[in-house]
Image (cartoon, grey):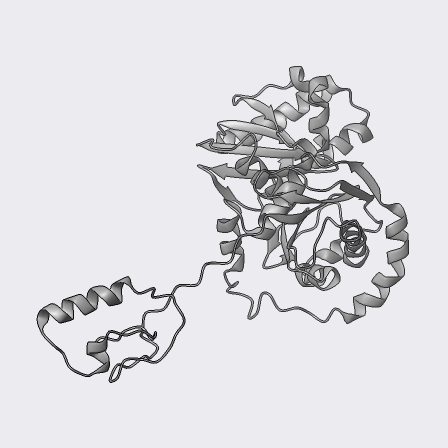
């Protein structure tokens, strides 16, 4: 039989047990329909069962977070800020500290912890605010499968669980260039662009993000393709240009060769340049050649922070990427298993004071 909601104020014809005439039943039904179904629950009408199948008001879905912490780990610097997820702007100063050397998980995580602690002490980061961290390497199931420009001890370490334990909040790990790509696809130069978009981040190394009709192909790491017999980033990254003593014209010509290699494979409709070297675009733009149009990232060297925050909250395009990340790895019984990390705590504690003394405020929020 049909079940009716459990609330007080039932029509008298139900309470009396009499069905009454058709007209009285219709009138009573109209009266029940006018009654506020979300009012306080009370006694059920006699003979009417109120079980789990009874209609109940739906609970509203929890509101998406307005802000999240974005963390960008590079070979030379670790940066973080609170990000407004609605506008893509920074909601706090951007803090930076030099990447510890050697850049082991314990040392880098403590550096990150010092920055986030400072954001909390200054009232920008609140308890429970999610955090996303972009690191240079292939990310699978909360772990790095490769490590570029950071210590190789990151490979296979439960980095996501270690970060979450240190920060005391939920953390999402993502490839650093993918994070920059998420920012540009959501708010910046790649927003609404159909076809194939290639983003290259140029700094200590070269990161990459590839979008096809707005869908991210994650962890591409094109900086490690073979160019002139070597890893491309060892020849044409920003750090390689300085190490080799190349002027902008010479470097621009070689970087164009590298882009031509990628164009032959992927035929991008748009190329976006980000990372630290993108801030110097005016110095070398005239030396670059490519079949596709070339633009700089709208967020320049801040894209990684903004995108990591988007990944933390699973906002927009990032949601699809996280769904793939959360799928179980066929070769791993429990891909999100948190390895014992107590042994890291004592070593990390010894580094905390040094981290706090090294923080630098790079800029103020763009509100």
With respect to residue 90, does 32 lie above or below?
below
Q: Answer yes or no: is residue 228 visible.
A: no
Residue at 78% across, 55% down: 113
User: For this view, does 269 lie left or right of residue 52?
Assistant: right
Rendered location of residue 177, percent (x, y): 63, 41
With respect to residue 148, does 13 lie above or below?
below
Q: Nearer the viewer, residue 364 or 163?
A: 364
Say which quarter of the image contains residue 346: bottom right
Residue at 24% across, 66% down: 31
User: For this view, does 260 lie left or right of residue 249?
Assistant: left
Q: Which residue, as the protein is rendered here, is positioned at the far top?
A: 286
Q: Nearer the viewer, residue 290 or 3?
A: 3
Q: Quadrant of the C terminus?
A: top right
With respect to residue 166, does 210 lie above or below?
above
Q: How many marks?
A: 0
User: For this view, does 269 lie left or right of residue 47?
Assistant: right
Residue at 27% across, 80% down: 45
Rendered location of residue 197, percent (x, y): 51, 32
Q: Answer yes or no: is residue 279 visible.
A: yes
Rendered location of residue 209, percent (x, y): 57, 39
User: For this view, does 326 lie left or right of residue 281?
Assistant: left
Residue at 52% across, 27% down: 270
With respect to residue 283, does 184 lie above or below?
below
Q: Quadrant of the N terminus?
A: bottom left
Rendered location of residue 44, percent (x, y): 31, 80
């Amino acid at each position: 039989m049909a079940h009716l909601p459990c609330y007080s104020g039932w029509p008298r014809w139900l309470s009396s047990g009499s069905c009454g005439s058709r007209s009285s039943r219709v009138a009573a039904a109209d009266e029940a329909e006018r009654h506020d179904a979300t009012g306080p629950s009370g006694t059920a009408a006699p003979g009417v069962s109120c079980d789990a199948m009874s209609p109940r008001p739906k609970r509203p879905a929890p509101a998406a977070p307005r802000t999240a912490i974005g963390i960008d780990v590079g070979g030379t610097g670790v940066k973080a800020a609170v990000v407004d997820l609605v506008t893509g702007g920074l909601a706090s100063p951007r803090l930076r500290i030099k990447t510890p050397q050697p850049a082991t998980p314990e040392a880098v995580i403590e550096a990150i912890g010092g920055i986030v602690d400072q954001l909390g002490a200054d009232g920008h980061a609140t308890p429970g605010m999610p955090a996303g961290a972009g690191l240079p390497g292939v990310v699978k199931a909360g772990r790095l499968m490769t490590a570029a420009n950071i210590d190789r001890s990151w490979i296979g370490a439960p980095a996501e669980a270690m970060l979450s334990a240190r920060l005391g909040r939920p953390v999402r790990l993502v490839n650093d260039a993918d994070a920059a790509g998420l920012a540009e696809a959501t708010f910046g130069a790649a927003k609404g662009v159909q076809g194939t978009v290639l983003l290259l981040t140029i700094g200590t190394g070269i990161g990459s993000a590839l979008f096809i009709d707005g869908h991210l192909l994650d962890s591409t790491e094109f900086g490690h393709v073979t160019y002139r017999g070597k890893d491309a980033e060892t020849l044409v990254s920003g750090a390689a240009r300085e190490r080799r003593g190349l002027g902008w014209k010479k470097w621009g010509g070689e970087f164009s060769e590298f882009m031509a290699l990628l164009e032959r494979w992927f035929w991008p409709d748009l190329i976006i340049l980000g990372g630290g070297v993108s801030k110097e675009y005016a110095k070398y733009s005239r030396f670059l050649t490519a079949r596709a149009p070339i633009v700089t990232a709208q967020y320049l060297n801040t894209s990684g922070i903004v995108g990591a925050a988007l990944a933390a909250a699973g906002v927009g395009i990032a949601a699809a990427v996280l769904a793939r990340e959360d799928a179980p790895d066929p070769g791993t019984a429990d891909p999100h298993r948190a390895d014992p990390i107590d042994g890291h705590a004592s070593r990390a504690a010894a580094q905390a004071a040094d981290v706090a003394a090294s923080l630098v405020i790079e800029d103020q929020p763009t509100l």
